[in-house]
Image (cartoon, rainbow, N blue to C red):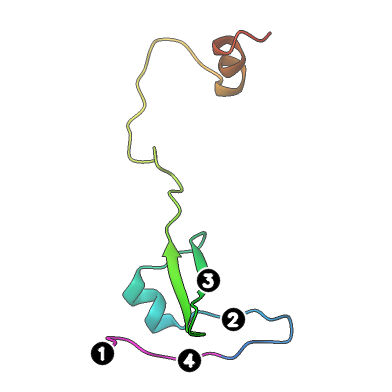
Amino acid sequence: MSRVEDETTINESHSVTVPAAVRREAGIEAGDKVRWRVEDDGTLAVELVKQRHGAFSELEPVDIGEETNAADDHDLVTGEQ
């Protein structure tokens, strides 16, 4: 038995809105994706694919005593100039 159940309508452009109660229960956030699958018996399955935006956002910056530029430094690391 489901803990949360709701329904929504498919609009003219075939988009759907995930109901707020479902978003809260599943922990769905902006930027997450859902994977749609139709099973052999015709059952529709939806799987949440979490996106890891800001994977480094909890890391503290380290002061190395000089200013850096990630775009320019990347080119140096790869040997391009």
Q: Secondary structure at mark 4?
A: loop
SS at badge 2: loop
What's the residue type where badge 3 is placed? Answer: Trp
Q: Position of residue 50 (x, y in %)?
A: 42, 58
Magenta residues, as a range? 1-8
Residue type at mark 2: give it. Val
Other-residue count near label 3 (Cα within 10 Å), few / some / many at <14 / 14–19 / ≥20: few
Q: Residues within 10 Å of mark 4 (few under 14, many from 20)?
A: few
Is residue 67 inside the magenta stretch? no
Percent position of residue 6, x then y: 42, 91
Residue at which label 3 appears: 36
Q: Which is more N-terminal, label 3 or label 2?
A: 2
Residue drawn where x is 56% and y is 15% of the image: 73
Which of labels 4 and 3 is toward the front?
3
Q: CA distance from mark 4 to mark 3?
A: 16 Å
Please tell me the numbered disc located at residue 1: 1
Q: Which residue is mark 2?
A: 16
Image coordinates for residue 24, horizontal then vertical, percent: 36, 75
Judging by the rendered image, the residue that carries numbered circle 4 is: 7
